[in-house]
Image (cartoon, rainbow, N blue to C red):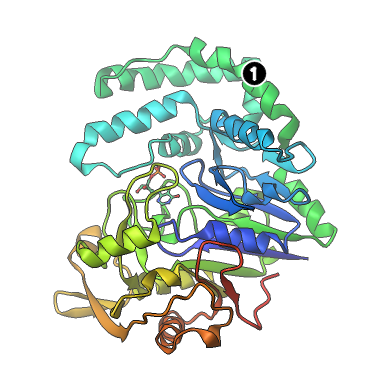
Amino acid sequence: MSCVVVVGTQWGDEGKGKVVDLLTRQADMVVRFQGGNNAGHTLVVGGEKFILHLIPSGILHADKHCLIGNGVVLDLEVLREEVEALRKRGVKIDAENFGVSERAHLILPYHRRLDQAREARKGKTSIGTTGRGIGPCYEDKVARRGIRVADLLDPEVFRTKVEENLKEKNVLFRELLQVDPMAPEELLEARPSLADFIRPFVCNVSRKIEEALGQGKNILFEGAQGTHLDVDHGTYPFVTSSNPVAGSVCIGAGIGPTKINSVVGIVKAYTTRVGSGPFPTELDDDIGRTLREKGGEFGATTGRPRRCGWLDAVVLRDSARLNGLTHLALTKLDVLTGQKKIKICRAYRYQGEVVEEMPACLKVLESCQPVYEEWDGWEEPLRDVKKRDDLPRQAQDYLKRIEELVGVPIGIVSVGPDRDETLIMEGPSFF
Ligand code: IMP
């Protein structure tokens, strides 16, 4: 019996999907605990490509139980499309292998409209959100006017809440954002079919996890986004509206902190970021463009090109502390092949002073200059390498230096997109 949490250590898109898929093999249950369909994993299984935004990729294994916890914000239309597309391709999804928390908050059409209209109004100063209504939904949750899965199942409760919420939203739409208001009927008419779709899956996720632990099962908690997009610990306000850090499992899935055994932090061998916000090691040059092309750095959710830069150990050290990382899983090492020199940012310089942690003040962070150390690159392709010791010496040095700078051992190294292009270190037991 064991609980493992997987989190992103940078600004998301670290390649969590592949590592989650790998660890899923040892898990009986896979649980999402925060975020929503702003996330996206592309998976290649048996030559077929799957893009999943909400359902854990564990669903592709018939014997795994997948759950969506209360901390996730749920767009039921997106979930329904995902379920239908998977079923069409022969994937089993029913109440036996999939469940959704009755307490999860719903992303409704007015959340999407608000997200997009606010971003459009901000213009150049926008956050660069995914436009999926994530922020407005979490806002309503904290403001205690959110609508949860359990509310959707009760027509009267749903009607009252929708009518009440739209009174406020429509003032915003008309007066401030200058977009069309929304009639309650739009939502009320969609309710019965959405309720019928979700009803079989609705459950108490916290209880399901407790039962599974009681039966000695292994549970994998799958984080979305990354630590530096965390609304508390990230580069606020250029963050998402949930907590992608490991501690958020306790709230977003309903388990106590004493139940967590290990926390695996996914680190891309360089850094990327989508959307706006500070990024000290960003490369606006040929190296940045090469990383984007070789690494296929375009968003799985929005298709936007990702900003690319060197690895930032300040970002990673913060993540090690904030998540209590027990292991690192380094992805996309093969993308660095062919770089003559590889840089690692070990600290920042601000007004002549060396800064070792991410400053909270955005203005300070924006003026920080990376302090780089430079390492030799390698020319050899890595995709056929099976052991860490068989990597080119320069790649081994790079891994060793990352471990030293971050203070956490690397347990997994990914050298290509396929499942078998992965080195698993001897020693660490994730479950
Ligand atoms: P939101 O989560 O749609 O509100 O977007 C807020 C910020 O988080 C934007 O900069 C997005 O680009 C970023 N973001 C949200 N989800 C992801 C993700 O899964 N990967 C990378 N960035 C993300």
Residue 360 visible in the snapshot? no
Residue at disc 1, secondary structure: helix
Residue lying farthest to the right in this orientation: 215
261 or 116, nearer to the observer: 116
Q: Position of residue 429 (x, y in %)?
A: 68, 76
In-image side of 139 versus 286 (left or right): right
Location of the N terminus (image quadrant): bottom right
How many other residues sit within 10 Å of disc 1, few (<14), some (14-19) or many (≥20)? Answer: few
**Residue shown at 44% from the left, 79% from the top:** 406
Whether the residue carrying mark 1 lies under 8 Å from ligand 1 is answered with: no
Q: Label 1 sits on what residue type?
A: Ser
Residue lying farthest to the left in this orientation: 351
| Up-down relation of residue 49 to residue 351 (above or below) | above
Location of the C terminus (image quadrant): bottom right
Q: Quadrant of residue 398?
A: bottom left
According to the picture, the residue beneath numbered tag 1 turns out to be 193
Q: Quadrant of residue 84?
A: top right
| Up-down relation of residue 284 to residue 372 (above or below) | above
Q: Position of residue 311 (x, y in %)?
A: 35, 72
Residue 317 visible in the snapshot? yes
196 or 396, nearer to the observer: 396
Q: Quadrant of residue 362?
A: bottom left
Q: Position of residue 244 (x, y in %)?
A: 49, 55
**Residue shown at 34% from the left, 45% from the top:** 304
**Residue shown at 54% from the left, 48% from the top:** 34
In-image side of 282 versus 416 (left or right): left
| Up-down relation of residue 351 to residue 62 (above or below) | below
Tell how many labels. Answer: 1
Q: Position of residue 344 (x, y in %)?
A: 32, 78
**Residue shown at 19% from the left, 41% from the top:** 124
